[in-house]
Image: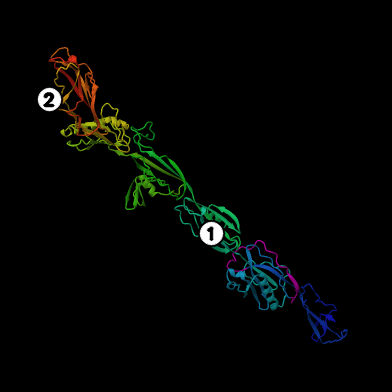
């Protein structure tokens, strides 16, 4: 048997050799596939056939390889992994050796997943791809566009990469008959730039970037929105491929007065904390994390805690106050105190504390209010339910601001607080409230006390405090009342009550606006009660009163004669009873008639007494005289000039008539001793009736 050689035109083989020149196992000889065996007659072949040439095909060594490829679909812009798992071991054999499925395929790099397996079908001259179900989560692979140089065959629905690999290898064995000759002698490169044409015996494991969700959540700090807070954006999410740029994300900037804190997390761990969503997004602009543990941009919004200052001051010229820059106080006396300056710390939008309606000291008003925005308001109006503030801004331009309220406020400050009811967004906010003294008009109310029946009571009237020319006096709360005004007002009163209608009426006293009168004054004067309140205009009432009482009299009638009669000389002491008679010798009692008016803040009282003011002596016989104690009243000896009480009334009333002693009274007794019983002797003495009254 010889090998090789050539045949000439006569069929003679020359150049043959006893060695097989094609016995090359290196796989590089151009003729390695063909062996020609020649049999000649000299050969000891038991079946020599010189006319037969046998051609033998010898299978050469082959390999099957596994590599990675980036699936060519809508998320192909995702970055490729920086490192790949080790590929399954390559398989060796010869042409036609069946390829076997790897016993295991390593898990794909985090952030990616297997999408399918591609191989080149030499028989059909096309790529064939076996897609896993996970690949369908993006865009159906059947929609991909393959290069024009190749028409791909697609097969879908494989549960995982192992199933897809098994299907691809089974198909390759069926279509290509196992391994087919290729020129590859080492691990082929990964296919990272699109859907390229396949290579026989190479199984490309396609991967895709994971689908990552980025969630954007918005919440108030503490879980509850502060008062008057703006509405936060709704929670939202966007999705994209791992490592690709996040698009369609919401934007949010906290309103002035509010602060954000943004915590970014991925794969169950915190990535970073940022002050704004923009900063968080700038630092985390690409999808990271995993499908199971997505990205989260948790935006927490909180109201800034702002400082609100309330400052109160007196308007320039306020009586009793010291103006800015001055060293002494203005004339007068303050009639109230400024509210204390205060500072509160509260969140943006929080409601300011409600003020009581009576926060102002009495007698004062609000001249101006500077609000936190720098506007100065000096007046307000209310119509329907609309409250309007009027003033100027910091540049001096006219400005108005309105609000809807249910009722009219009492003063400018309450109006301003109704229009600015909440804490603004500024870190420091200043309220400045200037109080001014209100104008006061003091008056003198003249009253006349009821005088009982038969007395016409003049109508009361009011006089304004006035100057000497009759001009009404007014002044600010706390301002001094000039003494000249007090004098002129009192003179005006005297002139007013000088007519006959006021006869028998006298000025009982003055009272100040608090109802007090000067009980210790030696004279009744308006100046006395003005002094009781410090001589200044009050913040409450400046109504003084002058009280007139009726000047009626309390009178009485009494006997003109107490007659002890004519008696015979008895020779013993005689006890005589006096009879009370008038000038006509008629019986006469002692009667008190009270015609006075009951005084203001007082009562009527009187006391009747009688006193022996001359001794009883003889007018006909010289030297005869009754001594002290011989005359008695109701048993009480009457000594010279020592009154004896006859009767009294501490609760008298106007027009009350009281009989103190009846006409038939036997109260007077006289003891006549024998020595004074002298023939022809006549005796005469004197008693005096005394009526004391109060007032």
Say few, some or many: other residues with alpha carbon within 10 Å of mark 2 (under 14 / 14 to 19 / 20 or more). Answer: few
| Residue placed most toward the observer, 457 or 634 | 634
Q: Does the magenta stretch include residue 149?
A: no
Inspect this view and state whether residue 272 appears: yes
Question: Considering only order in the chain, which callout, 2 or 1, is on the residue closer to the N terminus?
Answer: 1
Q: In this view, does 210 lie above or below 176?
A: above
Say left or right for 155 vs 491: right
Contact between marks 1 and 2 (CB within 8 A): the answer is: no
| Residue placed most toward the observer, 126 or 315 | 315
Instruction: From the top left corner, tell me how far across and down residue 661 is, in percent.
Output: 20, 28
Say left or right for 569 vs 207: left
Segment colored magenta: 71-97
The residue pinned by badge 1 equals 216
Instruction: From the top left corner, tell me how far across and down residue 102 is, in percent.
Output: 71, 70
Q: Is the magenta stretch mostly helix, strand or loop?
A: loop
Picture quarter containing residue 34? Answer: bottom right
| Residue placed most toward the observer, 534 or 545 | 545
Instruction: From the top left corner, tell me how far across and down residue 180 is, in percent.
Output: 72, 75
The residue pinned by badge 2 equals 583
Q: Is mark 1 on a helix, strand or loop?
A: strand
């Amino acid at each position: 048997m010889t090998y090789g050689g050539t045949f000439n035109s006569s069929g003679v083989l020359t150049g043959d050799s006893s060695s097989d020149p094609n016995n090359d196992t290196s796989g590089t000889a151009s003729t390695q596939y063909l062996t020609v065996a020649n049999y000649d007659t000299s050969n000891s072949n038991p079946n020599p056939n010189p006319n037969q040439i046998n051609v033998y095909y010898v299978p050469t060594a082959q390999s099957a390889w596994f590599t990675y490829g980036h699936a060519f679909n809508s998320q192909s812009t995702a970055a490729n992994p920086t490192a790949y798992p080790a590929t399954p071991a390559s398989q060796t054999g010869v042409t036609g050796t069946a390829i076997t499925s790897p016993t295991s395929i390593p898990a794909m790099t985090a952030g990616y997943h297997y999408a399918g397996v591609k191989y080149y079908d030499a028989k059909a001259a096309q790529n064939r791809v076996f897609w896993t179900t996970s690949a369908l989560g993006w865009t159906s692979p059947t929609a991909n566009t393959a290069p024009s140089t190749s028409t791909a065959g697609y097969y879908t629905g494989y549960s995982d990469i192992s199933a897809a690999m098994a299907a691809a290898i089974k198909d390759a064995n069926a279509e290509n008959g196992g391994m087919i000759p290729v020129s590859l002698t080492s691990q082929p490169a990964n296919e990272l730039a699109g859907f390229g044409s396949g290579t026989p015996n190479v199984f490309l494991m396609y991967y895709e970037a994971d689908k990552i969700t980025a969630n954007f959540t918005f919440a108030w700090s503490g879980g509850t929105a502060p008062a008057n807070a703006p509405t936060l954006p709704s929670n939202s999410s966007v999705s994209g491929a791992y490592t690709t740029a996040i698009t369609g994300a919401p934007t949010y900037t906290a309103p002035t007065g509010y602060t954000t804190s943004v915590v970014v997390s991925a794969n169950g761990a915190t990535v970073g904390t940022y002050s704004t969503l923009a900063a968080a997004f700038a630092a985390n602009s690409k999808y990271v994390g995993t499908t199971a543990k997505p990205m989260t941009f948790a935006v927490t919004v909180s109201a800034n805690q702002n400082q609100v200052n309330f400052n109160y001051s007196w308007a320039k010229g306020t009586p009793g106050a010291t103006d800015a820059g001055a060293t002494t106080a203005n004339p007068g006396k303050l009639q109230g105190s400024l509210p204390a300056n205060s500072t509160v710390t509260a969140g943006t939008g929080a409601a300011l504390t409600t003020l009581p309606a009576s926060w102002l000291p009495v007698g004062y008003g609000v001249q101006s209010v500077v609000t936190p925005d720098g506007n100065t308001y000096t007046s307000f109006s209310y119509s329907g339910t609309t409250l309007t503030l009027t003033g100027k801004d910091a540049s001096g331009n006219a400005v108005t601001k309105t609000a809807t309220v249910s009722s009219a406020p009492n003063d400018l400050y309450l109006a301003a607080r109704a229009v600015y009811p909440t804490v603004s967004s500024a870190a420091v906010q200043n309220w400045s409230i200037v109080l001014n003294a209100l104008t006061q008009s003091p008056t003198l109310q003249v009253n006349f006390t009821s005088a009982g029946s038969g007395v016409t009571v003049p109508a009361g009237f009011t006089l304004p405090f006035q100057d000497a020319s009759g001009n009404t006096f007014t002044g600010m709360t706390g301002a001094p009342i000039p003494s000249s005004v007090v004098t002129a007002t009192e003179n005006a009163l005297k002139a007013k009550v000088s007519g006959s209608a006021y006869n028998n009426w006298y000025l009982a006293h003055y009272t100040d606006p608090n109802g007090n009168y000067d009980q210790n004054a030696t004279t009744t004067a308006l100046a006395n009660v003005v002094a009781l309140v410090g001589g200044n205009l009050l913040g409450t009432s400046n109504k003084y009163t002058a009280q007139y009482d009726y000047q009626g009299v309390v009178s009485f009638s009494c006997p003109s004669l107490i007659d002890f009669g004519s008696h015979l000389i008895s020779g013993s002491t005689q006890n005589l009873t006096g009879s009370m008679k008038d000038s006509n010798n008629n019986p006469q009692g002692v009667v008190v008639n009270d015609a006075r008016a009951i005084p203001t803040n007082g009562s009527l009282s009187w006391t009747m007494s009688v006193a022996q003011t001359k001794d009883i002596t003889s007018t006909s016989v010289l030297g005869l005289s009754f001594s002290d104690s011989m005359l008695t009243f109701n048993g009480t000896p009457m000594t010279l000039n020592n009154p004896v009480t006859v009767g009294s009334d501490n609760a008298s009333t106007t027009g009350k008539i009281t009989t103190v002693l009846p006409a038939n009274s036997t109260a007077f007794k006289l003891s006549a001793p024998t020595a004074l019983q002298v023939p022809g002797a006549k005796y005469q003495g004197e008693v005096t009736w005394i009526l004391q009254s109060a007032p």
